Amino acid sequence: MLLLFLSYKVIGSRNKIVNFDIKDTSYVELISFEKNTMKTIKDNVKLRGIITKINGLKGEEVNMENEGLSAMDFINIYDKSFKKTVVGRNNNYLKINDKWYKLDSRSSKNFENIFNQYN
C-alpha cells in the first residue's frame, strides 16, 4: 500500500513546473496586455483557486528566444515579504523567472481559465 501511495505521488508530480505555498502568498496581479487589463486579487478564497491552478500546470523546460512573441498574459505572485514571481504565458509557452516551459494542452487551458474566471 505504501508503494502504491509513493508511486502515485511520483507520477502526479512528474513534469510539474512550480509549487507555490498558498499560505505564503500575499496577493496576485493578473495582467493581460491583449485586453489592456490588470486586476489585483487579495481575497483568500480566490488566491487559493489561482495558486492551486498554477501549481497544477505541467510542461517541459525548453530553450526559447523572446523574438516573435505576441502579447503575453502575466500573473505576478507576491509572497508575504513582497517578493515578486512573474509567470507569463504566450500560447502554449510559459515563462517563469527567465525559464521557458512548453505546456501541455490541459495546462494551457487552465492558465487561460484563470483569466476568464478571475479577471
Image (tube, rainbow, N blue to C red):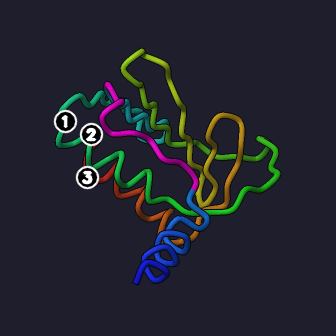
In the displayed structure, 83 sits above or below 102; it is above
Q: Are marks 2 and 3 in contact (CB under 8 Å)?
A: no
- Circle 3: residue type: Gln
* Quarter the N terminus occupies: bottom left
Disc 3 secondary structure class: helix
Q: Residue at x 25, y 52 (%)?
A: 117
The number of numbered discs placed on residues in the rendered structure image is: 3
Q: Are marks 2 and 1 in contact (CB under 8 Å)?
A: yes
- Circle 1: residue type: Asn
- Of the pair 108 and 78, the residue shown nearer to us: 78
| Residue 115 magenta | no
**Where in the figure is residue 56, as x and y percent of width and height?**
44, 59
Q: How far apart are the alpha carbons under marks 2 and 3?
A: 12 Å
Q: Which residues are magenta?
A: 17-26
Mark closest to the chain's N terminus, 3 or 1: 1
Indicate which disc residue 47 carries. Answer: 2
Disc 1 secondary structure class: helix
Q: How far apart are the alpha carbons under marks 2 and 1?
A: 5 Å
Please rate how many residues cluster around mark 3, counting C-alpha atoms within 10 Å: few if below 14, some from 14 to 19, many from 20: few
- Determine which residue is flagged by label 1: 44
- Circle 2: residue type: Leu
Indicate which disc residue 117 carries. Answer: 3
